[in-house]
């Protein structure tokens, strides 16, 4: 770059000299001297002090050699010309230094503008960042672009041990070595800067600044300086940037704490509901079981065999009730913790309903279960076991809340790209106000409080159906009872999977 | 059910003393001999020492895992094994069945269910199913003639439907995983990805055999696992 300026200045000088030699002697000597200032200015603006002084000297020499008598000699015959030289040289030097200072100021303000732009970019990002990690990467990138040195950001882990969290690309692994980590750790613990250009560990290669807000240090910014010497405003810039990063981290921490507080409050509320429900649902059967077993053991001789069977039945029913509660609680926990993974396969609606019917056979008593399945139900993509669990739960509810001898209708049909499974009973129905809430955890309608139940069944159903991308809803069944409708999406029906399969199997059959 | 399984020796491998006690008392009442093991290691040892006719194995053993016990025993013994599993562990059940378990019972279980499974497993060992004609109520399957009759009337089946029915019926009472059925009916290279074949063919069979396809009498679905051909006990 600098060499190029020297070259251009020289070329300009040669051209000027050539032009003047054509014009001369029609032009005044003073004008020629003034025009020789042009390359000087050029050198000052583009190259600074060195090239401009070079241009001045070159101009003076050419002027003297070609245009001041005696020609083609450095000798000066007229002493007045000597003063022209001095004035020329002084003007040239002054111009050169002014121009180069201007240039330095321009450079400086460009650099400051760069800093301001970096700070502006980071602070704008801060107002809307979602990912602290990418923000830190941007901070370290901005540092290395602005200062021209690789940067590393250290953050403490859960055990309060510092580790590299973000760093700019660099050929060696600077920043993650033991030496760097030790200094960074010192900075983190003490909250003071260290490294090159500071009073602590000045001999080190890097500069380490704490990322701090008022009350605490959140991490450490390390910059690999090597031989670069930072100006005081570069250091201020680094501190400002570090401050922004610290504020961002403080904000993340605060929002995490707020979320935790909210969660705690919610779980507090939920815990009360769980305790009420679970303690009631556990204690009631336990009391009857313990009582019955105790009675049987203490007074065996007193009971007729029919009494004995009754007490044993009580024990079994109580245990079954507790088993249902435990299954529901476990199911809920699995759903809420996201542990439940779907084992998707093609499920056959008729097949699933056959299992459900066999499951509820023992307690449906005299209720009539009517099944209406459209002939053309395609296979449903889903987890067979879980969908059966949903259906069993819904059908069991229909049985539980409807009088003996009434009819329950299970209807399966396709609606657009979905399959709809509706279970309609003629039972006590759901209050319009509760129609949404029945799918809430631990919610139980007031008028059902005399019946055992945890308020978990439908919540689990909803969770499972939604995992399948489906929808479950409750509605009044005409004038009497409830319809629960489950809608599950069917995939790629335009391929008509069933037909495809039938065809491939027919082909298979023929070749056998 | 009459004599063949009376006095058979059953080994219970379960770490829970309560469950062992329950099984011991009730199996005794059903006239079975009972041996117990409280850990997997002990179970394997007992299986080789006491020559049981059937093993009831809890899959949730603390020391080495029921699956390992199952595989170790299967390395040298064909003794029928019925596994006890928790409710929502379909993968475990399938893995156990595909690895050589004969059947499974889900905890908490009724003793009636367990005893029925034990009887079916012992009966299959006794080889009483190698008869040429299988009868299940109104359904008759003549293996020699490849002829199926329902209520005295011949049922027309495609070759695949017949093979599927034959496989299910000759394993009557025993659960068959989807994979076992696919491999036995369609051949070795069929696996889980073709399980919808099975579903569709079971649907066809039910249409031809069952009076109400939503309340099947013969081919029962074992949710998430496979199918079981019902036998009266």
Image (cartoon, coloured by chain):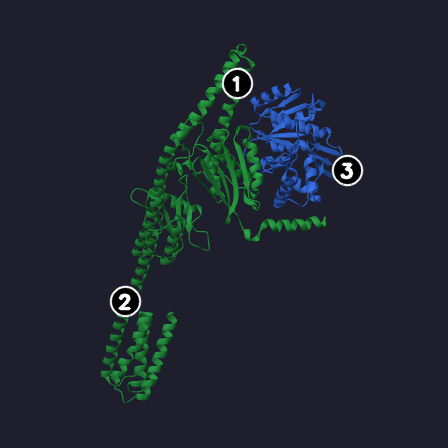
Chain colours: A green, B blue
Mark 1, residue position: A310
Mark 1 vs mark 2: in front: 1
Residue at disc 2, secondary structure: helix
Disc 2 vs disc 3: Cβ atoms closer than 8 Å?
no
Camera-nearest residue between A206 and A423:
A423
Camera-nearest residue between B20 and A398:
A398
Quarter containing the N terminus of chain B: top right
The numbered disc on residue B161 is: none
Q: Relative to residue B50, is residue A277 drawn left or right?
A: left
Residue at disc 3, secondary structure: loop
The numbered disc on residue A101 is: 2
Chain identity of mark 1:
A
Camera-nearest residue between A324 and A341:
A324
**How far, Cα to Cα, is label 2 from label 3?**
110 Å
Chain identity of mark 2:
A
Q: Relative to residue A124, is residue A287 drawn left or right?
A: right
Q: Which residue appears farthest toward the front when viewing the image?
A: A479
Chain identity of mark 3:
B
Mark 3, residue position: B144
* Residue at image location 52% in from the left, 13% down from the top: A297
* Residue A69, quarter of the rendered image: bottom left
Percent across and percent down for residue B215 are 59, 35
**How far, Cα to Cα, is label 3 from label 1?**
51 Å
Quarter containing the C terminus of chain B: top right
Neighbourhood count class around disc 3 (C-alpha, 10 Å): few under 14, some 14–19, many 20 upward: few
């Amino acid at each position: 770059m600098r060499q190029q300026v020297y070259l251009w200045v020289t070329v300009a000088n040669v051209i000027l000299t050539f032009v003047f030699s054509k014009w001369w002697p029609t032009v005044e000597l003073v004008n020629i001297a003034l025009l020789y200032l042009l390359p000087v200015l050029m050198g000052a603006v583009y190259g600074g002090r060195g090239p401009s002084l070079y241009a001045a000297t070159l101009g003076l020499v050419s002027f003297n050699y070609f245009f001041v008598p005696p020609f083609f000699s450095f000798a000066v015959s007229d002493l007045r010309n000597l003063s022209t030289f001095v004035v020329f040289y002084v003007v040239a030097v002054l111009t050169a230094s002014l121009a180069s200072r201007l240039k330095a100021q321009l450079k400086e303000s460009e650099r400051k503008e760069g800093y301001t732009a970096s700070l502006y970019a980071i602070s704008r990002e801060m107002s809307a960042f979602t990912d602290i990690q990418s923000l830190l990467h941007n901070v370290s990138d901005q540092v290395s672009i602005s200062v021209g040195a690789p940067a590393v950001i250290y953050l403490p882990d859960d055990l309060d041990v510092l580790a590299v969290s973000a760093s700019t690309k660099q050929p060696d692994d600077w920043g993650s070595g033991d030496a760097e980590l030790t200094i960074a750790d010192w900075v983190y613990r003490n909250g003071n800067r260290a490294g090159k250009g500071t009073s602590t560990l000045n001999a080190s290669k890097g500069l380490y600044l704490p990322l701090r807000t008022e009350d605490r240090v959140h991490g450490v910014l390390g910059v690999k300086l090597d031989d670069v010497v930072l100006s005081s405003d570069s250091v201020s810039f680094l501190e400002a940037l570090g401050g922004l990063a610290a504020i961002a981290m403080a904000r993340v921490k605060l929002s995490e704490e707020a979320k935790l507080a909210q969660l705690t409050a919610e779980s507090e509320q939920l815990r009360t509901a769980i305790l009420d429900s679970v303690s009631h649902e556990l204690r009631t059967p336990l009391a009857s079981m313990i009582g019955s077993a105790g009675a049987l053991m203490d007074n065996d001789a007193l009971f007729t065999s029919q009494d004995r069977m009754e007490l044993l039945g009580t024990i079994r029913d109580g245990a079954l009730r507790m088993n249902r509660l435990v299954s529901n609680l476990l199911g809920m926990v699995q759903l809420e913790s996201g542990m439940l993974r779907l084992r998707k396969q093609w499920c056959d609606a008729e097949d699933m309903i056959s299992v459900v019917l066999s499951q509820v056979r023992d307690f449906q008593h005299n209720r009539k279960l009517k099944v209406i399945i459209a002939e053309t139900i395609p296979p449903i993509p889903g987890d067979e076991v879980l969908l059966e669990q949903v259906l069993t739960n819904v059908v069991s509810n229909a049985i539980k809340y409807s009088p003996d001898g009434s009819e329950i209708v299970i209807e399966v049909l396709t609606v657009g790209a979905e399959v709809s499974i509706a279970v309609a009973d003629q039972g006590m129905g759901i209050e319009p106000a509760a129609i949404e809430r029945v799918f809430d955890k631990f919610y139980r309608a007031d008028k059902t409080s005399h019946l055992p139940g945890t308020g978990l069944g439908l919540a689990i159903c909803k969770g499972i159906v939604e995992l399948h991308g489906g929808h479950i809803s409750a509605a009044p069944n005409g004038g009497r009872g409830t319809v629960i409708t489950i809608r599950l999406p069917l995939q790629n029906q335009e391929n008509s999977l069933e037909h495809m399969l039938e065809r491939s199997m027919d082909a298979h059959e023929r070749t056998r | 059910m009459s004599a063949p399984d009376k006095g058979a020796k059953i080994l219970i491998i379960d770490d829970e003393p309560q469950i062992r006690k329950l099984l011991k008392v009730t199996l005794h009442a059903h006239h079975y001999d009972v041996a117990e093991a409280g850990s997997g290691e002990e179970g394997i040892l007992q299986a080789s020492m006491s020559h049981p006719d059937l093993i009831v194995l809890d899959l949730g053993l603390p020391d080495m895992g029921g699956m390992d016990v199952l595989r170790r025993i299967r390395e040298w013994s064909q003794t029928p094994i019925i596994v006890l599993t928790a409710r929502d562990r379909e993968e475990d059940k399938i893995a156990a069945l595909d690895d050589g378990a004969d059947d499974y019972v889900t905890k908490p279980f009724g003793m009636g269910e367990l005893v029925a499974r034990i009887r079916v497993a012992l009966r299959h060992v006794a080889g009483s199913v190698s008869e040429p004609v299988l009868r299940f109520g109104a359904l008759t399957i003549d293996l020699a003639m490849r002829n199926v009759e329902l209520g005295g009337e011949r049922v027309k089946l495609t070759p695949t439907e017949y093979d599927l029915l034959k496989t299910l019926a000759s394993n009557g009472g025993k659960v068959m995983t989807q994979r076992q059925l696919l491999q036995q009916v369609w051949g070795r290279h069929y696996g889980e990805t073709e399980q919808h074949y099975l579903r569709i063919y079971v649907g066809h069979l039910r249409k031809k055999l069952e009076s109400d396809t939503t309340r099947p009498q013969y081919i029962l679905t074992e949710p998430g696992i496979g199918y079981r051909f019902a036998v009266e006990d």
